Amino acid sequence: MKILLILLICLTTLTPTKGQYILDVEHTGVNGGMGIRSKSTASYSVVDIDAFNGDAALRFYREGIGKWNIRNNPSTDAYQIFQLGAGVERMRIDADGQVFIPSNLIVSGTVVKGGGAFKIDHPLDPANKYLMHSFRKAPT
């Protein structure tokens, strides 16, 4: 218990330069993985990533493979899934709840919604006209 307390005091008093880690856990063994776990016997467990001014992100990567961020965008307050290296936003949920997916969405189950609309190019004049359809689900 004393070692843990000393470690926590050190973590709160160290001021690393930009790009350094205060806590860096490396596993070099060959018998399985390594992790950091937050476990609670209460109703929930939280890991807070709090960036006072800037990007608060959880980064996933494997050596030689693309790196991914799940982050709170500091300029828009949007939740993003972002691919590093390629510099591509893969999904965003804005502060008002709108979801943006800039690529295809594949759903293997059922999509249920109260209403909707779509707009496609008109097959006879795709450069100048659209076909638009909207609907509202009736009560069951």
Image: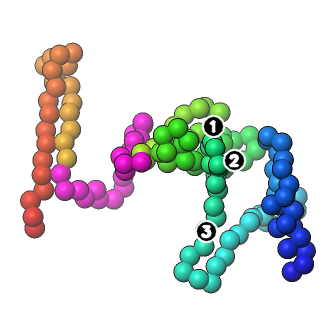
Location of the N terminus (image quadrant): bottom right
Whole-percent x and y of residue 68? Answer: 62, 44
Q: Assign a secondary structure to mark 3.
A: loop
N-terminal-most mark, 3 or 2? 3
The reply, left or right, for residue 5 in relation to residue 99 is: right
The numbered disc on residue 84 is 1
Q: Nearer the viewer, residue 12 or 104?
A: 12
Residue 105: say if magenta: yes
Please, what is the three-letter code of the amino acid marked with disc 1?
Answer: Leu
Q: Which range is magenta?
A: 95-115
For label 3, the crowd category at 10 Å Cα-Cα, with few meaning under 14, some 14 to 19 and many 20 or more, is few
Q: Assign a secondary structure to mark 2.
A: loop
What residue does disc 2 label? 61
What residue does disc 3 label? 46
N-terminal-most mark, 1 or 3? 3
Q: Are marks 1 and 2 in contact (CB under 8 Å)?
A: yes
